[in-house]
Image: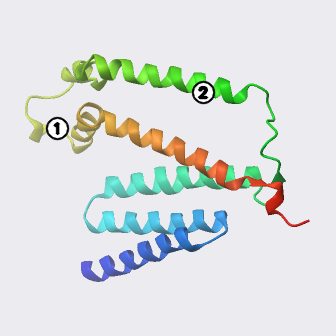
Amino acid sequence: METAVFFVASAIVLVGALGVILRSNPVHCALSLVMTLFGVAVLFINLDAQFLAAVQVIVYAGAVVVLFLFVIMLLGVDRAENLSVEPLRGQRPAAVSLGGCVLALVLVPVLRGHKVITGVHSAGGVLHDKPETQANITRLAHSLFSDYVFAFELTSALLVIAVIGAVMMARRPLREVAP
């Protein structure tokens, strides 16, 4: 039975991934992404990783893709815009300077040392001496926010970049739309 579930879920993931790549409508691409993420969640359940399946559905399919759909529909993919006109003067320089400040706030603790950003000191008193007596969620949280905090934050940055990419892809210049 596990093999059959694996093949069906893998087929769902592959068809959804191809839909993301091959569809021209951004809304259909986002819905194909939802199908892919649900297929991955079924694969997680098949591997007896229920927590990851729940996170997959709640965070990615439930929040991220809905955010993408909201941004795409909010911008209106059928509306043409003149991209040379800036709606708010000074927006781009302000965004560059604010981005530089955020990058500095992230890089300073990283360059000062690993112990500053990992939370090891604050989590050290909560954890037990024996890892086998800890709950799975406690071990997962400790591992995520101590050993893998940089990868965790990098993933959040990639999601923000993906939202910005969705916004830029949804905007069309005036010359691309036929009158």
User: Which is more toward the observer, 150 or 120?
Assistant: 150
Label 1 vs 2, first from the N-terminus: 2
Tell me, yes or no, if residue 2 can be seen here. yes
Q: In terms of secondary structure, where does tag 2 sit?
A: helix
Q: Quadrant of the N terminus?
A: bottom left
Residue placed at 29% from the left, 69% from the top? Answer: 46
Against 68, residue 36 (above or below) is below
Crowding around mark 1 (Cα neighbors within 10 Å: few <14, some 14 to 19, many 20+) is few
User: Which is more toward the observer, 150 or 94?
Assistant: 94
* Residue bearing mark 1: 134
Against 72, residue 34 (above or below) is below
Of the two numbered discs 1 and 2 in the rendering, the one whose residue sits closer to the viewer: 2
Q: Which numbered dot is residue 96?
A: 2
Q: Picture coordinates of residue 84 (x, y %)?
A: 79, 42
Distance, label 1 to label 2, CA atoms, is 44 Å
User: Which is more toward the observer, 126 or 149?
Assistant: 149
Residue placed at 60% from the left, 27% from the top? Answer: 96
Q: Picture coordinates of residue 51 (x, y %)?
A: 33, 52
